[in-house]
Each structure stands twice: as C-alpha cells, then as structure tokens.
Amino acid sequence: MFHVQSLFSFLPLKGGDHIKFDVTAKNENNKWISLGVSSTASMGDSDVMICSPGTNTIKRHWLDGYTPETGEALPSTGQGSCSSTDGSTTTMSFRRPLIKTSSKEIQIDNNKELYVCF
C-alpha cells in the first residue's frame, strides 16, 4: 500500500510580483512530488513544478494532457530547492512570478479562478 501525507502552503512575497510555494510529503517510498496550477479543472493546460528527490532538482513542466513535456530545470539558487530527509520526507520550495512570461505558464491573478493540484 502507498500512503502519503502532504502539506502545501503559499505566501505572496514582498513587492507583490512573486509568490512562494512550499510542499512537503512524507511517504514510505520517497517518490517525486509536484505542485501545479491551471485555469481549468482538468490536467490540460497546467503549469507544474516537479521535485525529484534522487536528483534534488525542480523542473517546470507544461502539461497539455496527462504527460508532461521534458521540463526546464529551475536554478538551484534563488528560485527553488528540492530535498529529501531521512529517506521518507521530501520538501520542495520555489518562488515564481505572478505574471506569466510565456504561453506555457499560468498567470496567478486574484481576480480569476485558479486550480491547484499537488
């Protein structure tokens, strides 16, 4: 049986142009964790960050369905961190702009509905 305990939080950052997300998952198998935002309730058109504890990297992926693109690694300093402790807890922290900078990003806007999956 696969059992996961997860927690995520977000915090608007000083200056108002970025937001910080923290995701922690405790599981027996130390698997990858992710957090995504979408303007729809489906998996399509989702902007997703995936943390792989074996590589300690975060990759940003665009999903237009259930399978992500290759993804782009976030710089390890400043934008995000991915780590694993004691073989069963994985933590991902990252910050991102509220305004999208490409067509493969979701804008975070207080005046629009936003879906979060993790």
Image (tube, rainbow, N blue to C red):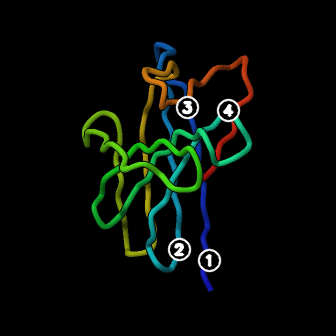
Mark 3 lies on a secondary structure that is: strand
- Nearer the observer, disc 4 or disc 2? 4
Name the residue type under label 1: His
> Gap between marks 4 and 1, in whole Å?
29 Å
In the image shown, does 11 or 110 lie closer to the viewer?
Answer: 110
Percent x, y of residue 105? 50, 30
Q: Earlier in the sequence, mark 1 or mark 3?
A: 1
* Residue at image coords 37%, 61%: 52
Percent x, y of residue 62? 48, 41
Mark 4 packing: few (<14 Cα in 10 Å), some, or many (20+)? Answer: some
Residue beneath disc 2: 27
Q: Earlier in the sequence, mark 4 or mark 3?
A: 3
In the image shown, does 5 or 60 lie closer to the viewer?
Answer: 60
Mark 2 lies on a secondary structure that is: strand
Name the residue type under label 2: Asn
Residue beneath disc 1: 3
* Residue at image coords 52%, 39%: 47
**Is the residue under label 2 in contact with that under label 1 (CB below 8 Å)?**
yes
**Is the residue under label 1 in contact with that under label 4 (CB below 8 Å)?**
no
Mark 4 lies on a secondary structure that is: loop
Which labelled disc corresponds to residue 11?
Answer: 3
